[in-house]
Amino acid sequence: MKFMVFKMIGFLLIYSMALYSAKAMSARSNQAWNSIDANNHASSKPVKVDVLDSVLFPENEPTLSVNEPMYFVVGGSGSTTAHFQFSFKYRIFDPDSTPVDWFQALYGLQFGYTQTSIWDLSDDSAPFYDTSYRPSFFWQGNLYGKGLMPKLLRGGFEHESNGKDGDASRSINTLFLMPFWGTDVSNNRTLIVAPKFYVYLEKSDNEDIQQYRGYVDWNVRFGNESGRLLTMRLRYGTAHRSSTQIDFSYPLRKPLFNRTGGFVSFQIFRGYGESILDYDKDNGTQLRIGFSMVR
C-alpha cells in the first residue's frame, strides 16, 4: 500500500513538472508576442492586480524568500509559554540558468527550513520545552489551474525531529503533496484551501503518530492580505484524535512585500501534539497573543 502511494505521489509530481514546463514555454512565447504588440500598440487601460495571484505567485520573488508564517506569541493554559517559529525557502536554480533552459520545471526546485519552538516561561530557569526542526526538499510550480485543477502544487520530502536523545527523541520522514486551490471573494479578500497529504517513510521513534496526526493537514487561509486575516490547520488521526490551530492577525504597519510586514497575532491551539514531543498528549486549549512578521 505504501509503495503504491509513493508511486502515485511520484507520478503526480513528474506529470505536474512536465505540465509546468510545457505551459511555461507557451507562456514565454505569448509574453514575447505580447511585448512586441505592446511596443507597437500602447494601451491606456490600467492593469488589474489579482490579489490571489499576488499571494500564490509573488512577482520578482527573491531566491531566498518567505515560506511558512514567522511569529512570536505568548500565553498558554495554566503555565505561561512562548510559541515562536521562523521559516524560509531557497530556490536552487536561477530562471536564466542553463539547467532551467533545458527543463523549465527545474526552476521550481526549492530547499525549505522551518523551526518551531515552545519556551517554558513559567519555570525558574525558563528552559526550551521542545523544538521541531523541519528541513525539506520540494518542487513547486504554477499549474495555471482552472475549475477543479489546483492553481499551485508543492510536493517533496520533509524531515521533522526534535534533536533529543533517548525516550524524548522524536523523528519522522515524510513524502508530501500539497495542492493549492483559491479564489478571490470580495473587497480584496481571498480564500485559499491547501491540504497537505503525506505518507510516513520512517517513524520508528513514534510508531503510532498517525493515530494523532493522520495523513493530511487541512489548511485554510481567508481574509484581506492588507487587513484582517484568518488561517487554520486541522489534523485528524486514525484513532479519532485531533488538533486545531487558528491564527488571526491584523497589520500594524504597511506591508513590506508579499505576506511580510508587522502584525498583531492571536493564536488558539486545541488538541493533541502542539509539539512533536507531545504528539500523543492532549494539550488542552492554549491561548496566545504576540507579533508576526510573516503570515
Image (cartoon, grey):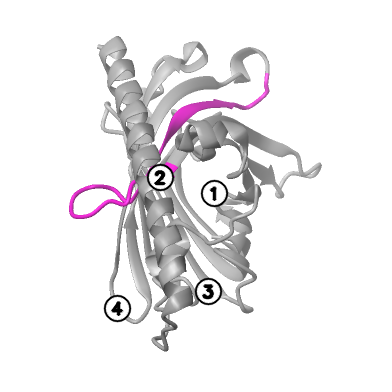
Q: Is residue 103 visible?
A: yes
Callout 4: helix, strand or loop? Answer: loop
Q: Nearer the viewer, mark 1 or mark 2?
A: 2
Which mark is first along the chain, 4 or 1? Answer: 1
Question: Magenta span has 151?
Answer: yes
Which mark is first along the chain, 4 or 3? Answer: 4
Which mark is first along the chain, 2 or 1? Answer: 2
> Residue 181, how many percent across, how many down?
30, 53
Q: Residue furthest right?
A: 125
* Amino acid type, label 1: Glu
The Cα–Cα distance between marks 3 and 4, rounded to whole angstroms, is: 18 Å
Residue 114, by quadrant, is: top right
Q: Is residue 70 left or right of residue 103?
A: right
> Residue 35, how many percent across, how many down?
46, 67
The Cα–Cα distance between marks 1 and 2, rounded to whole angstroms, is: 29 Å
> Residue 97, how many percent across, how many down?
62, 38
User: How many C-alpha atoms fall within 10 Å of the one at disc 1: few (<14), some, or many (≥20)?
Assistant: some
* Amino acid type, label 4: Ser
Question: Magenta span has 241?
Answer: no
> Residue 192, how many percent across, how many down?
34, 58
Residue that carries the numbered disc 4 in the rendered image: 186
